[in-house]
Image (cartoon, grey):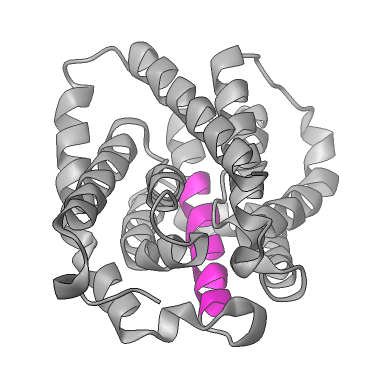
Amino acid sequence: MLASAAALPMGVLTAGFAVLVLAGMVKGLIGMGLPTVGIGLLSLFLTPAEAAAVLILPATVTNLWQYFTGPNVAGTARRFGVMMGAVVLGTLIGGLLLGGLTSPAAVPMLGATLLLYGALGLSAIPLRLPARLEPWLSPLMGLLTGLVTGTTGVAVMPSAPYLQALGLNRDDLVQALGLTFTVSTFALAAVLASPGEGGAVLTDPMVALASVAALAPAFLGMELGRRIRLAVSPLVFRRVFFAGLALLGAYMLARGFR
């Protein structure tokens, strides 16, 4: 479990603050990526379960805001309701029955997820799915997203590429992603608060306090990201972002098999 702030080296505290600012900045720039970047980098000096738990509160608050400020709250919930149910089921299965974030396989699995997501982002392959497949694919994509979330703490695969492939306009896509990330974060919180495979890491007072403290740097980063978005080419940033994710994923994958 996390030590108290007074017992942690100043370098770790500084690095943690910087990671949270960076993760928030990515969220402010492209509308997603806070848990992806945060868990990926925090897992370099925390366990994946601790890293995910620290990010529960900032992820929940920012994703709720992303969902409820969208153009069609009720319509998005109706359209993707079955998918969200499958996300919850998959997260509980992955987190409580398949080893979850406390498994030795969590680090390499997180690395593989980041590497794959980074590679897909860099490829810029235009994905398009016929509308007739959505009723069949949504539950499957939700279940797979939940399994990945429960075992790595990251909910972007395969939900983000799938939702992008549905051809949603930008506002609807951002809102659907916000709903997906909100639901997966709540389900992940249940896993992290559970004993056994869940590790009950979220019930540790120091972890809960760290999650509250993480709000400030995460929102600072989001504001920085919003300002940078006005001055920097989104295309250039996305390339740097996905390249960084791919490199981080490759490193974590290699580290997990040492």
Question: Percent x, y for residue 150?
Answer: 64, 63
Q: Is residue 133 left or right of residue 109?
A: right
Q: Is residue 173 left or right of residue 225?
A: right
Q: Residue at x 66, y 65 (%)?
A: 103
Q: Quadrant of the C terminus?
A: top right
**Figure label count:** 0
Question: Percent x, y for residue 80?
Answer: 65, 54
Decide which of 52, 248 is in the foreground and name it. Answer: 248
For residue 40: magenta? no
Q: Main secondary structure of the magenta part?
A: helix
Q: Residue at x 49, y 64 (%)?
A: 185
The magenta segment is 176-192
Q: Quadrant of residue 164?
A: top right
Question: Percent x, y for residue 37?
Answer: 41, 42
For residue 178: magenta? yes
Q: Quadrant of residue 197?
A: bottom right
Q: Residue at x 47, y 60 (%)?
A: 182
Question: Percent x, y for residue 143?
Answer: 75, 57
Q: Quadrant of the N terminus?
A: bottom left
In the displayed image of the protein, which residue is found farthest to the front? 258
